[in-house]
Amino acid sequence: MEFSGVKWLRIVNFWDYGSSVMARQARVFVDEGESGVYHVCSRVAGPMGWYPLAEKENRHQLIQYLKHYAALYQCRVYSFVVMGNHYHAILKFRKPGKLPKKFLKEKALQFYPKSEAHIDLWNENKWETFQNRLFDISEFMRSLNRAFTNWYNARTNSRGSFWADRFKSVILGSKRAIRECMLYIDLNPVRAGLVTHPEDFEGSSCHLRIVGKDKWLVSINEIMKHNKRSESLAHYRQLLYERGALPNRKGKLQIPQEVKKEMEQSDYRPRGVYQKKLKYFVNGVMIGSKLQIEEKLQELRTEINRFYYKRRKNALSHEAGDFYLQHGRGM
């Protein structure tokens, strides 16, 4: 990989640690071939003030494509929100491995329904390439965005790319990072002034969970660790209200004081912390534990030996914790 000029890497020290690369070209640091959970974001190509995804039919169609391709790929969807000119999703890709030939053929026919005779002629290399595709986040995003572009262009008699640039992705290295990122993106419609409560926004997984249409998503019980769905939903909703400093709805459970105390003791100030946009959730490399971040940095130092990293002596203040700047210079 060739680099020039000065790039800088940021480590964020709050409930977990996060690292963020602010220059767009530095996103090559993300190893998208590895298994794991990713926060992805795609924006539309167009002038300021153009919000094609605000139209209900367009938003609904994008969600249907997300559901469709999650079933085709080795992918599970934790959360998503479709805003007027961009969308966010948290995706989990299974660790790459050998899949049965019968299963692969079924998937291939779903991708290419009119090409069964051609598929039967695939050699082992072709089957291996197709298998690897099913675990690849870049292939997933390409399929999803291309399908929506083709649909939108046909519907509006348009031509050209619908999406601007390449999608952004951040590795979420811990269960806590996943949950906090879910809370952050679910509050997008509230930050944009579209709704008062995030579950009222129809273009989100939060809404689907409340109305019971979330069977294709990762179970809320798996995220919140409760046995009952109602308890998990109540706990998650109250965390949303706490992070967004939202007015509590009448009759809804409050967060127990012991839970609040535990969060405060973990060196994290929860109430209202996600009222503002936080760049490291989108323009990042990884959010995870201190150990995970250190391992990722060591991996970067090893794989990209033409870079060196140097920590600033003084941390920069931030409402969610401390920033540490790290510089890399092309050698």
Image (spheres, grey):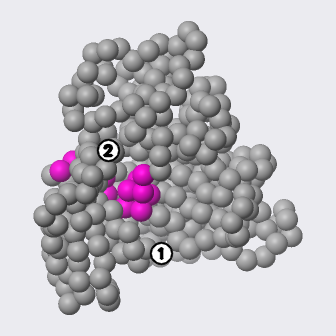
**Image height of 30 relative to 188, above or below:** below
Is 9 within the magenta? no
Residue 301's spot in the image, x, y percent?
A: 17, 74
Amino acid type, label 2: Ala
Q: Which corner quadrant of the image does residue 177 belong to?
A: top left
Q: Residue 319 placed where, x, y %? A: 33, 45
Disc 1 target residue = 126
Q: Which mark is residue 35?
A: none
* Left or right, residue 324 beside residue 102: left
Residue for point 48% across, 34% down? 244
Q: Is residue 25 left or right of residue 205?
A: left
Q: Amino acid at mark 1?
A: Lys
Residue 39 seen anywhere in this rendered image of the structure: yes
Q: Which residue is mark 2?
A: 320
**279 left or right of 162?**
left
Secondary-structure class at tag 2: loop
